[in-house]
Amino acid sequence: MRLLALLLLAACCVSSQSTEDSKVNATESTTAADGVDLGDRFGHRGPSRRPGSSSQHRPGGGGSYHGGSGEHYGGSSGGGSYHGGSHESQKRSPLNLEYGWKKMDFAFQSDSERRNAVRSGTYNYTKIIPLDVDIWEKAGRKKVFVTMPTDDGVPATLATVSFEGDPHAPLMAPYPDWSWHRHGDCRSISSVFRVAVDEYDRLWVMDRGDDKKCLPKLMTFDLNTDRLLSKYEFSPSVLLNRSNLITPVVDVRDNGRNTFVYIADVIGGLIVYDHQSKSAWRVNHPLTLPEPAFSTHTIAGSTFYLPDGVFGLALGPLECGGQRGQGGQHGQGGGSYSHGHGHGHGARCDQDRTLYFHALASRTENHVKTSVLRNRDNFPRGQNRASSSFKSFDHTRPSQSAAQAMSEQGVLFSGLLPDLALMCWNSEQPYAGWNLEVVAKDPETLQFTSGVKVRNGKLWVMSCRYQRFITGTMNWNEVNYRVQSARVADLIRGTKCDPKTNNIGSARLR
């Protein structure tokens, strides 16, 4: 397995805060790199083509983006050129800022420990980038989780907002505590890209491991006690040479008796984990691979090359005889969604739902039924006997997307990276330009939406200026990392994503 693929070797070890600041000033004076190729340096280089892909899986031309109120994506293939409407420059994000950091800092146990960490290089804020956010609330208790993939200079890869220091930019408290973050100790938490909170008060931590000796593992913590409930280490038989497991979504069934976790391997592929049987299998398909045509990204003036495969996952609501059942209280997307008892004209729930997925280097959204994924016999020894069950929508997004999430009502939220925007789609409607609508757009606060979750009817978004981080052009005097939120009902009210304003029941999955 390769060395962690995210972080630049930016600043050398520092011995004091003033030394840190001098390094920062040097970093700020650098200019944006044009067309930076990060594939080899960060270990993201995937296959050069998508085997078996056809024109159906690639965006076509002719589409356009229309700005202004009621922004939507038109065109038969959803792609095409970008056109700003008359009100676009005034349109700002309706998301509320929860937290904003110029740089990430930690709640060390003492000032001397912090100084020692800086001196030894264990803590170097220029090496830290937060990628994901998730939240747990119960009976007045609240935990906000932030992930920061490990590199030299990252003291803890998983933390909670500590509510110490500046309330708008609080310190990070390692989760569950400092003892779980010992570099090189495979019993610890090695490196985490994303996590998922489920409705049974469990935190699912997808630890990607390291490149030396620690295999990737899936850990589950009881959020009431912060105690470890389970740990599953993935066998090399389900991994490829450069596997990088980054995004989990949790499918809780039968009142918690059965749980499946679907995991994105960013080099191309899915892993299915059966919690009851403590087993896992690999799912390969061309739709999980990157598309070379979309491996170059330009975000807020920074251009870089990143050919990542399957990245964003979202789990749809329970389906009952062709109708939707009642979900649990959680939305998901890198998260969970519970099975309710269902409804829909008295139909018996067939216990199925849809997994939506896309590669980072792509504009295509894809889908597959979870009943296909949960049947291990479909995937013997790396084969895919159900390949025809994996489908792409006929229409595409206007640009690349990273994280995504789906609400309890089946509304998908996806970040549009080059457009610095967040779009929605009501999954009861065809996936097409006229049904894809921008609900938030901001050139400052929505630079690289790396984490998107829906929890208890509320959307949470992490934006991290990843494009500046990996091109070495961060300005540490500006707010770089943000956690923002909004009520889903408020975001979609009056839009084409609002079930109240749409003709529910039209053909889906077109």
Image (cartoon, rainbow, N blue to C red):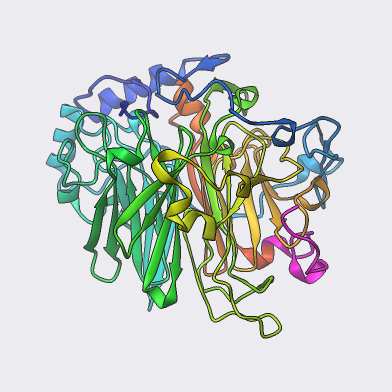
Residue 215 is drawn in which quadrant?
A: top left
Residue 394 forms part of the magenta stretch: no
Nearer-the-camera pick, 21 or 409: 409
In this view, the residue farthest toward the bottom is: 346
| Residue 496 falls left or right of residue 489 | right
Asked whether, in this view, residue 124 is left or right of residue 185, the answer is right
Q: Is residue 340 left or right of residue 345?
A: left
Examine the residues drawn in magenta and state their main secondary structure: loop
At 63% from the left and 46% from the top, the residue drawn is 388
Say which of 338 and 389 sits in front.
389
Answer whether residue 496 is magenta in the image.
yes
x and y, in percent, of residue 220 in the image: 29, 59
Q: What is the quadrant of the N terminus in the image?
A: top left
Image-quadrant location for residue 152: top left
Residue at the image position 38 percent from the left and 48 percent from the top: 281
At 26% from the left and 34% from the top, the residue drawn is 210
Residue 61 image point, x, y percent: 82, 30
State which region is magenta.
Answer: 491-510
